[in-house]
Amino acid sequence: MRVAIIGTGYVGLTTGVCLSFIGHQVSCLDTDESKIKALKDGHIPIYEPYLTDLIEEARTNLTFTSSYAEAIPGAEVVFIAVGTPPTPSGAPNLEYLSQAARSVGQHLDSPFTVVVNKSTVPIGSGNWVGSLLRDSVEQRQDKTLLEFAVASNPEFLREGSALHDSLYPDRIVIGADEQRALEVLYSLYRPILDQTFSAPTYLPRPETVVAVPLLSTDLASAELIKYAANAFLALKISFINEMGLLSERVGANISEVGRGIGLDSRIGNRFLSAGIGWGGSCFGKDTAALIATAGEYGLHLPIVEAAKKVNSRQRDRVVEKLLNELKILKGRTVGLLGLAFKPNTDDLREAPAIEIAQKLIDRGVRVKAHDPIAEERFQREYGHMNVHLCKNACEVADGCDALVLVTEWAEYRDLEWEEVAKKMRHPFLLDGRHSLDREKLTRAGIRYMGIS
Ligand code: UGA
């Protein structure tokens, strides 16, 4: 099928590459011409494992353009995957979505096109995009044979494992109020639903994935499923963090508590790792948007609100624990291991490291940091922050009064801890992710403490 994707961020680019890999003809459009030029030259604007390899394999089915006139005519499916950044009220900024919908409307020319909201958009956006498309089509001279329908196809991929999550998803959700739109999307996703494509060697099909469940529903339900899923995951993490606080007081081990409850199949063991809390561009934005949407209907969402409060308290706990240990923070040096909001990405949006660094700097601490991938981006976006970036973890440790493990990159698990200890002024490490081996560190002479 011929497909156009508007927006080449994490969601748009991953979707475009995966759809072209399974055999569709995909045109990825971005109005940022420099981004398109870079993509044409083989430079990928984001760090995502195996993305370069999959683009290479899908090359013959994949084109990049900045022109709606090139991308839209002939497309049977148009995905809108533009950014919806948060506004100060918590509601997402829909300006890019609106611009994209109008431009798509100006260039539609297939007898029937399905226009799909792939970005996370507020409930009701399907209807709204439909009305923008209609307005745009009506202004045209050549509108007679055009028919289109709007669908919602929320994305559940995680950064860092985006390709795996797209090729082997837990489920595909499609929502539309017109049956034929659902049928087009069913055909589009069939190779993934039936798992009939040959898996790339570097992204092998998990043994448990035989077929992928499809949920076909109405527009509003599909839109709410996306927000409800992210809110639930966010509150699962906040719940374990709240239990962590209590664990600490009663002398329990939060990792054991997480394991113990997670073995109950009704609860499940994922997203129960306690620590400094969630970051990234999705959980914070989507919980805020959900609260804002409920507000429009005069509703409060106390559970979602509590999840946000607990999350922000986790960042303060880093400072509290450092204060307890070091007594005076002014003039101290603290090293952060990891800057990205999670491993395997260079994304710094709402990264806990940024908030923690700022809180420490405000208290007169000298902050050093290392990240295997995100340093260049940090320099570009947060260069003004006065954080001293280092080449490796040992260089961070040099002269530090404390280290904080912020991002659980695999390489930090096997550091030469004796070497690290020797470099530190005060060998103390706060593990913000419960990812290091307490005994190993203790043997190396480092006082270890988890955040729970
Ligand atoms: C999240 C969802 O997991 C995806 O399903 C969704 O598609 C995506 O948002 C989105 O809406 O686009 P993502 O933000 O990429 O994906 O990353 P996650 O793996 O969910 O991690 C989010 C944050 O939670 C990270 O800071 C991570 O460190 C933290 N986390 C995760 C915990 O603190 N504890 C856990 O047990 C799990």
Image: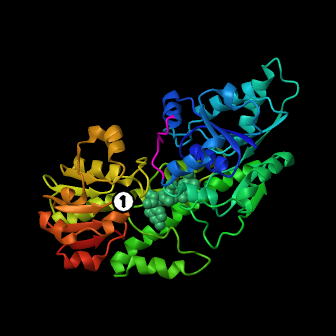
In the displayed structure, 137 sits above or below 205; it is above
- The crowd level at tag 1 (other Cα within 10 Å; few <14, some 14-19, many 20+) is many
Compared across the picture, whether 181 is left or right of 426 comes to: right
Residue 371: x percent and y percent? 32, 53
Quadrant of the rendering where the C terminus is positioned:
bottom left
Residue kind at label 1, given as amino acid type: Thr
Above or below for 243 versus 166: below
Q: Residue at x 33, y 54 (%)?
A: 372
Asked whether, in this view, residue 415 is left or right of residue 211, the answer is left
The reply to whether residue 127 is visible in this rendering is yes
- In the image: residue 263, left or right of residue 364: right
State yes or no: Cβ of the residue under disc 1 lies below 8 Å from any atom of ligand 1. Answer: yes
In reply to whether residue 304 is colored magenta, the answer given is: no
Is residue 450 placed above or below 319 in the rendered structure?
A: below
> Which quadrant is the N terminus positioned in?
top right
Give the camera-side residue of 398 and 89. Answer: 398
Q: Quadrant of residue 327?
A: bottom left
**Depth check: 190 or 430 in front?**
190
What secondary structure predominates along the stretch shown in magenta?
Answer: loop
Start and end of the magenta stretch? Answer: 41-48
The image shows residue 329 at horizontal and vertical percentages of 17, 56
Q: Which residue is mark 1?
A: 407
